[in-house]
Amino acid sequence: MLFRQFFDHASSTYTYLIASSRGREAVIIDPVKEQVAQYLTAIEQLGLRLVKAIDTHTHADHITGLGDLRERTGCLSIMGEYTKADCVSCRVTDGEVLDTDGIRLQALYTPGHTSESFSFVLAPDAPVAVFSGDVLMIRGTGRTDFQNGDPGKSWDSITRTLFALPDDTTLYPAHDYKGWTSSSIGEERRFNPRLAGKTREQYIEIMNNLDLPDPKMMDVAIPANLACGLDAG
Amino acid sequence: MLFRQFFDHASSTYTYLIASSRGREAVIIDPVKEQVAQYLTAIEQLGLRLVKAIDTHTHADHITGLGDLRERTGCLSIMGEYTKADCVSCRVTDGEVLDTDGIRLQALYTPGHTSESFSFVLAPDAPVAVFSGDVLMIRGTGRTDFQNGDPGKSWDSITRTLFALPDDTTLYPAHDYKGWTSSSIGEERRFNPRLAGKTREQYIEIMNNLDLPDPKMMDVAIPANLACGLDAG
């Protein structure tokens, strides 16, 4: 298997490229529109063929590369079944497994940050890693105050769905702002300051009082992303 | 083995934490002074004991965390044998292998970016990864216009020493400015625009005409780093 993590400095977004070293088919998760040329360079130089581009959810802080990648490579554009983005070519359901040349990714419905967020587990029979979008982040969690976010659902998605994965499952979130590039389920269970030793009620209280400003790009990014980034110029 | 990559946003520096999952002894490569508290948090939460802190060379763009980590953990501070930093507790020679609880790192003398730069190969008997400092970067190379840098020596270090490693050796540089987090020796051999298809003379010409401004922190960082970052406040 071939694995690459990319970082978009402007939005602190992590993007993941996963490919089979056998048939060279590749999947990309949470691509950023401004970085599409870089992904295509990597895909070409590594001798890969992009067949799937996945967004974990409708991002509010950057414009997705899903549409551009589909236009440039003919890949499928994929989101979870509750997305409002009419532009996606395929919607996955909770528990569904996407198989790409032997690279297996299981979709898990993990609402909370938004009502349509999914996570994706790599090699679900013996989990290696989980791409958690903005639901669970490294020593943090995604805000729950817009796009039908819900702190109670965030708690349930994290503690019942993601924390049910083995402790040594590597956690790859869609963002980090402190310079960490990965974590593990066990670490977040034990050390995430919003979750460890907290009750569901305490978590809801924390999330309802974060008092964060709206993301700078929100008014642009959400409508653009509902069109897979293709109307965004 | 446990492996973590950290990113310092201010200087675009990558720092690497490598530990044995058996005895929990850890090595850190190219730590940044401002991030020491984060490394110590990770080391504590992962149940590790830091025993070695390595700088690949005297950095000109950030202040090293070597001294602070030695003071806080009692670890060895390590650089190559030609460093002018009197503060290091151990100097490695070309070809020497550092064994940390079974984690083997071989020091390779790779001058060019500076006259005292070393790279470190993980598991040298069957190379897994190389930490190349600023000598070889992802689709780039480190500038050669100060600290006794020498483009001819940079070419020789890269093409004779680093490119002698197997193609599938993962490349982990000390910096990246475009959002890539790793590469491989084979990729750089084939696709690094300063090296692929170039002669030694052409490379020297490219490097001698980069016309880069001095690093912003150079006048502070170099003297501070010769004291392992401990006089830097």
Image: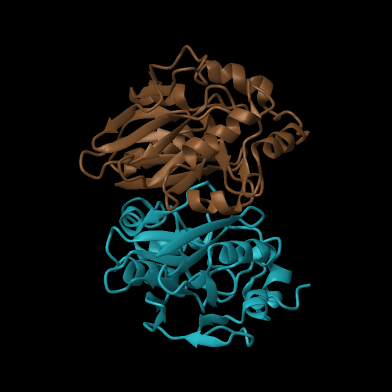
Chain colours: A cyan, B brown
Q: Is residue A197 left or right of residue A225?
A: left
Q: Residue at x 35, y 50 (%)?
A: A191
Q: Is residue B186 visible?
A: yes
Q: Is residue B111 above or below residue A182?
A: above
Residue B64 screen position, x and y as percent: 52, 27
The count of marks equals: 0
Residue A146 lies in what quarter of the image?
bottom right
Q: Residue at x 40, y 51 (%)?
A: A193
Residue B154 screen position, x and y as percent: 59, 32
Q: Nearer the viewer, residue A214 or B106?
A: B106
Residue A106 lies in what quarter of the image?
bottom left
Residue B19 screen position, x and y as percent: 31, 40
Residue A40 lies in what quarter of the image?
bottom right
Q: Nearer the viewer, residue A94 or B134?
A: B134
Q: Quadrant of the C terminus of chain B?
A: top right
Q: Nearer the viewer, residue B191 or B45?
A: B191
Q: Is residue A11 above or below residue B23?
A: below
Q: Residue at x 28, y 59 (%)?
A: A167
Q: Is residue B183 visible?
A: no
Q: Residue at x 45, y 66 (%)?
A: A132
As drawn, which residue projects farthest toward the left? B22
